[in-house]
Image: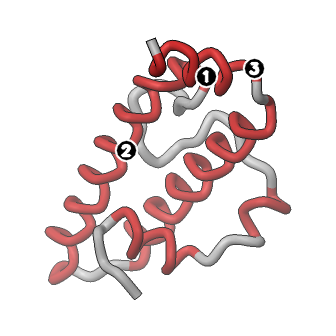
């Protein structure tokens, strides 16, 4: 019952959804940038990041449905992104967070 109430509240809260979309967008862009920048010795770590991101997306979709999602099946292409929101985030912090590294 409490989960249903929480989900209904989240669905009505535009700002929560906006922040979730922003988070998804920033993470996806950070993964894309990381993939372009890594060497062969970092491919396994990058794959771990992508898997962690996919798991995060599954959890978010459990709460928000398809409202917080990406275009198609691609992990690295966000459906919504704002340049102002993206530029205000620190990509390394996001990558470390989804990779499970505490700073």
**Which of 10 and 65 lies nearest the eye of the viewer?**
10
Q: Is the N terminus in the top left, top right, bottom left or bottom right quadrant?
A: top left
- Looking at the rendered structure, the secondary structure element under dot 3 is helix
- Residue 100 circle label: none
Of callouts 2 and 1, the N-terminal one: 2
Which quadrant of the structure image shows residue 101? bottom left
Q: Are marks 2 and 1 in contact (CB under 8 Å)?
A: no
User: Real-space Cα distance between discs 2 and 1?
Assistant: 14 Å
Residue labelled with disc 2: 56
Left or right placement of residue 97 versus residue 55 in this view: right
Q: Is residue 56 above or below residue 3?
A: below
Residue 38 image offset from top left, x and y in percent: 33, 78
The residue lying at 48 percent from left, 25 percent from top is 63
- Residue 67 circle label: 1
Q: Are marks 3 and 1 in contact (CB under 8 Å)?
A: no
Q: Are marks 2 and 3 in contact (CB under 8 Å)?
A: no
Residue labelled with disc 3: 12
- Looking at the rendered structure, the secondary structure element under dot 1 is helix
User: Real-space Cα distance between discs 3 and 1?
Assistant: 12 Å
Of callouts 2 and 3, the N-terminal one: 3
The residue lying at 61 percent from left, 49 percent from top is 25
- Looking at the rendered structure, the secondary structure element under dot 2 is helix
Residue 81 image offset from top left, x and y in percent: 72, 46
Residue 75 image offset from top left, x and y in percent: 41, 43
Q: Is residue 19 above or below residue 93?
A: above
Of callouts 3 and 1, the N-terminal one: 3
Q: Is residue 12 above or below residue 90?
A: above
The residue lying at 14 percent from left, 68 percent from top is 44
Q: Nearer the viewer, mark 3 or mark 1?
A: 3
Give neighbour class at mark 2: few <14, some 14-19, many 20+ (Cα, 10 Å): some
Which quadrant of the structure image shows residue 49? bottom left
User: Real-space Cα distance between discs 2 and 3?
Assistant: 21 Å
């Amino acid at each position: 019952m409490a989960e249903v109430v929480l989900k209904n509240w989240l669905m009505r809260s535009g700002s929560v959804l906006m922040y979730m979309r922003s988070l998804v967008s920033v993470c996806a862009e950070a993964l894309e940038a990381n993939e372009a920048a890594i060497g062969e010795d970092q491919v396994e770590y990058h794959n771990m990041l992508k898997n962690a991101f996919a798991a995060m997306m599954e959890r978010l979709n459990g709460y928000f449905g398809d409202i917080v999602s990406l275009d198609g099946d691609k992990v690295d292409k966000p459906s919504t992104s704002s340049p102002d929101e993206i530029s205000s985030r620190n990509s390394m912090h996001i990558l470390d967070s989804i990779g499970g590294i505490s700073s």
